[in-house]
Amino acid sequence: MKNVKLLAVGLLTSLVLSACSLTLPVTATSNAVGKKVGTSSATGYFGIFFFDADASIQTAAKNAGISKISTVDIKMSNVLGIIVTYETIVTGE
């Protein structure tokens, strides 16, 4: 019985602490890859409720002072489907 309780606690802990993250390329331009990297993000709850969220390419470029964008990637993170984060990553000069 003690082993079953220990197993249940272990499974519950791993479920609560589990998360998934995926980074995908969105686009690339013919501009040379620059040294500047800008990010913008939006965090939502249950995939529906996003408050003051701005994960736009324009905001990511503005945050790093980028005027010539080279690449754009998007990173999506998910914690049990409850907390979802989208992050836009822009590189350029």
Image: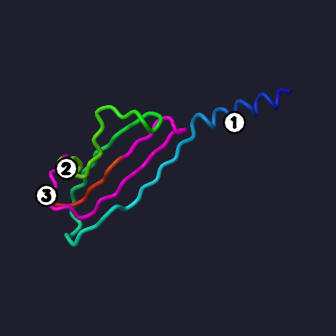
- Marks 3 and 2, Cα distance to the nearest angstrom? 9 Å
Q: Residue 11 carries which label?
A: 1
Q: Which amino acid does label 2 sit on?
A: Ala
User: Against 59, is 80 above or below?
Assistant: above
- Marks 1 and 3, Cα distance to the nearest angstrom? 48 Å
Q: Which mark is residue 64?
A: 2
Residue identifier under label 3: 67
Q: Does the magenta stretch include residue 83?
A: yes
Secondary structure of the residue carrying tag 3 is: loop
Q: Which mark is residue 78?
A: none
Front label number (3 vs 2)? 3
Query: In the drawing, does residue 2 fall left or right of residue 25?
Result: right
Across and down, in percent, residue 73 comes to 34, 57
| Magenta-tinted stretch | 63-86
User: Against 32, is 61 above or below?
Assistant: above
Q: Which amino acid does label 1 sit on?
A: Leu
